[in-house]
Every structure is written in C-alpha cells, then in structure tokens.
Amino acid sequence: MTTQSATTPPISRFPVPAIADLPEDLRQRVLEVQEKAGFVPNVFLALAHRPAECRAFFAYHDALMLKETGNLTKGDREMIVVATSGVNQCLYCVVAHGAILRIYEKKPLVADQVAVNYRKADIAPRQRAMLDFAMKVCEASHTVGDADFEALRAHGFDEEDAWDIAAITAFFGLSNRMANTISMRPNDEFYLMGRVARAK
C-alpha cells in the first residue's frame, strides 16, 4: 500500500499509496513526471492519499504555474512561491520550488536569498516590487489597496498580473499549510538541483 520503507523517513504522516495503486489518471501523471524529472516529487504521492483533492490541487496549480499569458515569467512565479513559503515556514515548498527557481533563473544562490530575505536578494527591482505585493497578500491581505496596485504598475505589471501574484500566493498558502500539517518531506534530489552543473 505504501512506497515508504523502514530505512527512509516517511514522506507524510498519512498513508502514501503505491504508484501501482493510484487511479489511472493520477498514475499516468506521476509516471510522466517521473519520466521527465527522473524521480517522483513526494507531493504527488502524499496528496494522492485523497485522489479527488489531489486532482483539484494540481488542476489549480497548473492553471497558475503553467499559464503562458501575462507579464510573469516562470521564474517570477517560482520566486513568489519560494518567498511566501519561506514566511510560512514550509520546508517542502521552499526546497522543491527553490530547486525549480534556481533552474529557471540560472542562479544557484537566488532561492536561498529569496527564502530568507528577498529584500537583500540579487533580484531585479521589478521582482522586488512583485514580492512586496506577494508578501502583503501573504501576511496582511486585508490591507491591500490602490497604492499596492500602483506600485506594481510602476514596474510594468497590470491588474491581471496582480491577480496572478495574489492567486499564486494564496494557493501556496494552502499548500504550505497542508505540507506542514502532514509533515511532507522534500525529496533529497531537490537539494542539489540548480546548484551544481550536471555531469555531461
């Protein structure tokens, strides 16, 4: 029933289904990710404990993170995840999305900087403005107002981009809280991704 073994720490405090036992659509998705990445990110197996919620989670994830319109790059989107997940103290999302951020930005140091203190990170002024907005949504969404949208506009973001920043922040707020609650463990593979050159 489970992919966890006695020799490795569990990836979740809840039961983790074996890939072979997943519903066909989820199994195919996991196998596709495994083919592409070379391993199965633990989030897929941990959330598959509840298949209907797992499908809904990844449908919204894909709508936000794979979107091809707007002024946010793939790196920008991952940066929002890492910065806000750092504030929410989510180990899984900081480590997993930090790896993706390093790869997209081609900067081996950026994820650590952004996770700890994006204001001191080696990022562009537009990205700092983007994270200022994301952090306000993350920590004090009830105070978001016209001035915050104006600050984004000054850096070339429109209102639809503001929606994207807020939606990514809010969605990963849910993800962070669930990952923390179920003690979701990051895959070891994530830690070195984007830090060292791949062997040729």
Image: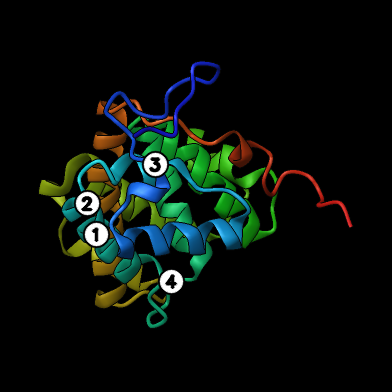
The answer to whether any part of residue 11 appears in the image is: yes
Q: CA distance from mark 4 to mark 2?
A: 30 Å
Comparing 8 with 58, the one in front is 8
Q: What residue is disc 4 on?
A: 72
Label 2: few (<14), some (14–19) or many (≥20) C-alpha neighbours in 10 Å: some
**SS under mark 4:** loop
Earlier sequence position, callout 1 versus callout 4: 1
Give the farthest residue toward the bottom: 69
- Label drawn at residue 18: 3
Q: Residue at horizontal 34%, vertical 73%? A: 153
Q: Nearer the viewer, residue 59 or 110?
A: 59
**Whole-Å distance between the Cαs marked 2 and 3?**
13 Å
Q: Residue 116's spot in the image, x, y percent?
A: 50, 33
Q: Which residue is mark 1?
A: 55
Dot 3: within a 10 Å radius of its alpha carbon, few (fewer than 14), some, or many (20 or more) residues? some
Looking at numbered disc 4 in the image, what kind of residue is underneath it?
A: Leu
Q: Tell me: residue 130, above or below residue 6.
A: below
Snapshot quadrant of residue 86:
top left
* Kind of residue at badge 3: Ala
Q: Is residue 25 left or right of residue 73?
A: left
Q: Disc 2 marks which amino acid?
A: Pro
